[in-house]
Image (tube, rainbow, N blue to C red):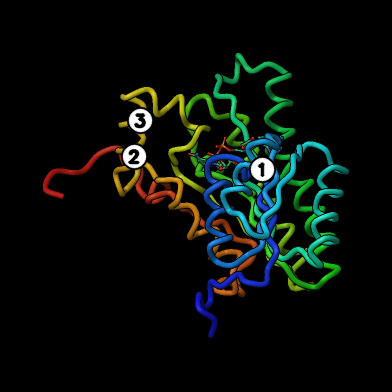
Amino acid sequence: MSQNGLFDLSGRTAAIIGGGSGIGEAVALGAARQGAAVIVLDLNGEAARAVAARIGGQAGASALDVRGRSAVRDALDRIARDRGRLDIVVCTAGINVRKPILKYSEDEFDGVVAVNLKGSFNVLQAAGRLMTAQRGGSIVIFSSIRSQVVEPGQSVYAMTKAGIVQLVRAGAAEFGPFGVRVNAIGPGVVETPLTAPIQANAEWYAAYADKSALKRWARVDEMVGPTLFLVSDAASYVTGTILFADGGWTAADGRFTPPGM
Ligand code: NAD
């Protein structure tokens, strides 16, 4: 068995979309440590290039907006052409506008849906086309605990993250016969730029820490293991699932600990 065993990614090419920041950046660095040739793609091309520079070696980077279907297809096709094949695609690109339903503008709605839902579909379609043709590959798209449970202000974000769960299941069903696996990760609360406004509010930060069974937020590197598990041979029979990396957030309702417990 190779040095990293079931989790070895050497000889594989991985595109990490949203890899310029937060969870995607950590996953890009982690996949490279496991031996993958990593290409970092992000709306922020400069950030993507900075992550690729930190990886060094055979890493590449370019700007990509997941909202454009042909741009996504061209970017992934180019990687497959340049590198011979594309084995792994992880998409963490996502945005949130936290706002009450009654105050949500049409532009805000369209903006969140375009990145989270249409963007995820574009990635699944482009990666699926390549991987079914080469008869193998693994796709991971980032959902959220908000696919299952909500709080005020999460309407559109939650709806897109629930949509990703069904999208992943549909991808697994259609691509499975070709040896292509499709899964989702459902993070809890992770310290990244996306959640900076919450981290800056001490009461909000503490309430979120208290909600999970582990009584704390996740560090960004704690999303790397679950993601690399899903893209590696360790998960060779895992497809169509959502893996919650949420510190027990969705397991416990957290309202009250009965006396004596
Ligand atoms: P982040 O904001 O740190 O990183 C997201 C990256 O996506 C950024 O680099 C951004 O430039 C890129 N991006 C945004 N729009 C894009 C577009 N149109 N095309 C290409 N790239 C685009 O966020 P994060 O916290 O790392 O979140 C990553 C994923 O995890 C998201 O899908 C998010 O919804 C999900 N998630 C995060 C948390 C959390 O607590 N941080 C919790 C649950 C789910």
The residue labelled by disc 3 is: 205
Disc nearest the viewer among 1 and 2? 1
Say if disc 2 is inside 8 Å of ligand 1: no
Helix or strand or loop: what does disc 2 sit on? helix
**x and y, in percent, of residue 16 in the image:** 66, 51
Disc 3 crowd rating (10 Å Cα; few below 14, some 14-19, many 20+) is some
Q: Are marks 3 and 2 in contact (CB under 8 Å)?
A: no
Spatial CA distance of label 1 from label 2 is: 36 Å
The residue labelled by disc 1 is: 49
- In the image, taking residue 35 as reference, residue 110 lies left or right, namely right
Amino acid carrying mark 1 in the image: Arg
Asked if residue 177 is positioned above or below residue 76 in the image, the reply reads below
Amino acid carrying mark 2 in the image: Lys
Circle on res. 164: none
Quadrant location, ligand no. 1: top right
The residue labelled by disc 2 is: 211
**x and y, in percent, of residue 98 in the image:** 55, 24
Asked if residue 94 is positioned above or below residue 81 in the image, the reply reads above
- In the image, taking residue 259 as reference, residue 27 lies left or right, namely right
Q: Residue at x 63, y 65 (%)?
A: 36
Depth order, front residue of 105/75: 75
For marks 1 and 2 on the same chain, the one whose residue lies earlier in the sequence: 1
